[in-house]
Amino acid sequence: MPSISWRARSVQASPIRKLKPLADQAKRAGKKIYHLNIGQPDIPTPKEYFDGIRQAAQGVLAYSPSQGLDEALDALAEYYQTFGIPLSRDQLIVTTGGSEAITFAMLAVTDVGDAILVPEPYYTNYNSYAQITGIQIVPIETCAEDGFRLPDRKSIESKITPKTKAILFCNPGNPTGVVYTKAELEMLAELALKYNLYLIADEVYREFTYDGAQAISVLQLQGIEDRAILVDSISKRFSACGARLGVIASKNASVMESALKFAQARLSPPTLEQYGLIYLLKSSRYQDFVRQMIAEFQQRRDVVYAELQKIPGVSCPKPNGAFYIIAKLPVEDAEHFARWLLTDFALDNETVMLAPAAEFYATPGKGRDEVRIAYVLKVDVLKRAMSILREGLHAYTQTR
């Protein structure tokens, strides 16, 4: 039998989704599961988004231009302008989700065998994109005790080699919820200039900031316009994960010309979904929708954080952004515990599903006692889920 490719062998299974068979089995057995493992908001997508799709759903459903519909590019440019980020059409490409935007960025600035630096823990699918494109992720180690803030400049510089081509970071962070300060971002910008690197910023959670924190865009940094690349998605801020619409943006013409070639090779981003986005961004309600959603998520964060503080042996920094918490548990193997919750535990026939955190790290051995919790459910549901987690931890540790 012919062998499969090295890419197929090396790409990891999603740690966020790999426990799904156990969850399906638990559901078939009649258990109710509270999903804290995946960043799927439960807030209804704005009505205006569906109105835009319905109005466009007639005649021939044709390809859109590879770069995206002109109206979508203009609507996105207006959106970024509200943050003081001026972009022209040729500095934007609509992608099939943020995942494609990140992959395009990697393909545009690296060759096979090159490396990019990424603060860890990081969104685990970065590993898959890197393995598919044939590059290496080199971790910049951060720790919960410091709130997952970036280490000092010397620590980051020690990771840079001739193979290093970019620094990729998520701001606000998935899975940490960290919001980087202006000083931290300016340090990265200085390193990019000194070592001739690109800065790739995953800004999917831009609006999700709390307690006065503010996410500064990579495109707002001065003096690095030729090496700043923004990747984005509408999945979270508009609660539209299934729309699969993302963005890659840069003022570097060579980067955008390269990304457009990749976009042409995949033909077209989703057409109907772009009409939904156009209609929503032209409406007067989308900013109110986002503000209300952020207020709701801050309440959810406060509840989950407060409940975790009550559980013996659990520790976690309070996140300032996104909608995740990395929690250290009083267990040796968080993945084993997460499996056990699905297979061997229930409280009144209910249990919770968590995302083990080890695979959010590249450094071997790190994160084995940690989980990522996505606070994407209603406040009363989260309170119930936290009580189940508390009882589950107690039962699990008593058996060991």
Image (spheres, grey):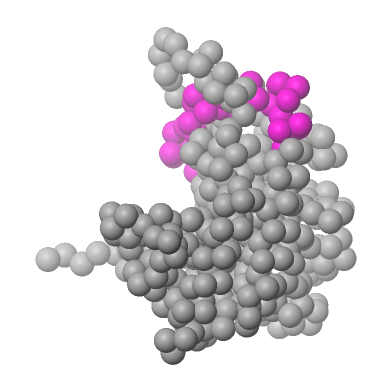
Front residue (pair 119, 19): 19
Chain part drawn in magenta: 261-290
Front residue (pair 350, 236): 350
Front residue (pair 17, 342): 342
Rendered position, 219 above or below 310: above
- Left/right placement of residue 346 relative to residue 49 reads left
User: Which quadrant is the C terminus positioned in?
Assistant: bottom left
Farthest left residue? 1
Q: Is residue 266 magenta?
A: yes
Residue 119 screen position, x and y as percent:
66, 70
Farthest top residue? 59
User: Which quadrant is the N terminus positioned in?
Assistant: bottom left
* Residue 281 showing in the rendered view: yes
Instruction: Identify which residue is drawn at 60% across, 24% down.
Output: 47
Instruction: Identify which residue is drawn at 41% across, 66% down.
Output: 346
Instruction: Identify which residue is drawn at 49% across, 39% down.
Output: 242
- Left/right placement of residue 357 relative to residue 319 reads left
Residue 38 screen position, x and y as percent:
51, 55
- Left/right placement of residue 384 relative to residue 297 reads left
- Figure quadrant of residue 44: top right
